[in-house]
Amino acid sequence: MPDEKEAKATEDRKIQHINIILTKETQYREKTTMLECVRVEPHGGAISSKEVDLSVAILGRKIAAPLFVSGMTGGHPVTFQINKNIAEAASKLGIPMGVGSQRAMAENQSLSYTYNVKKYSPNITLIGNIGASKLPAYTNEQIKGILDYIKADMLAIHTNPGQESVQPEGDLDFRGILKRIKGLKPDITQSIILKEVGNGISKEVASALNGAVDAIDVQGAGGTTWIGVETYRSKGSYGEAFWDWGIPTALSVLECRSTFKGPVFSSGGIRSASDIIKSIAIGASACGIAKPVIMAERKGGAEGVYLSIKGLLDGVKDGMAEMGFENIEQLRNAKVSFSEPLSSVLKQRGI
């Protein structure tokens, strides 16, 4: 287990990340999500948005819409109110939320309260979080402990070699991680999600994950680049060269859907109702959003988050109604087409 100095460094890093996201330009500079290359064909004549049902079942949980708040933070006193506000809004809307990496509470139990949002929003579907490269440092019992403490319904294991390569304290030793993930299954009752942090997941990786995890969250390129975030922290030029490294979100969803047998989640640069509609149409079971939520929370607290997400979901309903889709199942079976450059890349990749 880490010493007190290392635990303090982890805690400080949490608030540094939030401050950089809020004050610096961390968007991909050249690469997009490629969702702009997706066209969804109408299902039929326009209907009323009041007729549209967004509810879905994800990993055995019924949720109000195919949307969740991606895990972002925790592990610093300031982050407690952020997570509490997001949980209040998400619970009211009937959608899940994730917490940031629980490494900080594993290293320092006094920070556990910053993740414990179910104490205030008991009905929320909550997604725990631990880093893939840190899995070998903890026993199954310890991981089960941090999940059970916050009453997590699912576990997201984040893999982030791009971020780790630039992070001053980065750990690039991912040896044996797939075997370690498989080793969690006997002791972890929660569904396990493998997620990236903004660089996407390829079909080769997705294929290897069959049987090891229950779902994949692609967190593709096109939104926030965590290589960029760590570049600000490292004050070096290495990260600049890889600022736009990663697989665009739309491409990553399609790659994972081509080989992975479980649900695939679309996240990374999801900013609009159109992004959500297109993601579902190309095979995503749900979408994750992050930066728009943290921005809304900092400006307006729980109410700001609620209004921001509700507006987004109202837009999804309106868009689906205009194209004649009454529910998510119909949208999943929509006819889609792809324009350049996505169409060429799909052909090159044999998808």
Image: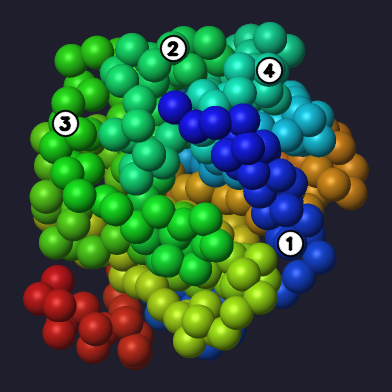
Which of labels 4 and 3 is toward the front? 4
Nearer the N terminus, badge 4 or badge 1? Answer: 1
Under mark 1, the amino acid is Ile
**Residue 225 place in picture, x, y as percent:** 54, 68
Sequence order check, earlier mark of 4 and 2: 4
Pick out the residue farthest to the right.
300
Mark found first going from the N terminus, 4 or 3: 4
For the point 35% across and 72% down, the residue is: 247
Instruction: Let me know if residue 44 appears in the view.
Output: no
- Residues at marks 2 and 3 touching, judged by CB atoms closer than 8 Å: no
Q: What amino acid type is highlighted by mark number 2?
A: Gly
Does label 2 or label 1 sit earlier along the sequence?
Answer: 1
Q: Secondary structure at mark 3?
A: helix
Badge 4 element:
helix
What separation in Å lies between label 3 and label 1 (alpha carbons)? Answer: 34 Å
Above or below, comparing residue 66 to residue 164 in the picture: above
Q: Is residue 176 toward the left or the right of residue 82 in the image?
A: left
In-front residue for pair 312/151: 151
Crowd tier of the residue under label 4, counting other residues whose Cα lies within 10 Å: few below 14, some 14–19, many 20 or above: few
Question: Is residue 154 at all visible to an observer of this figure?
Answer: yes
Q: Answer left or right for 236 relative to 199.
A: right
Residue pointed to by mark 4: 110
Residue type at mark 3: give it. Answer: Lys
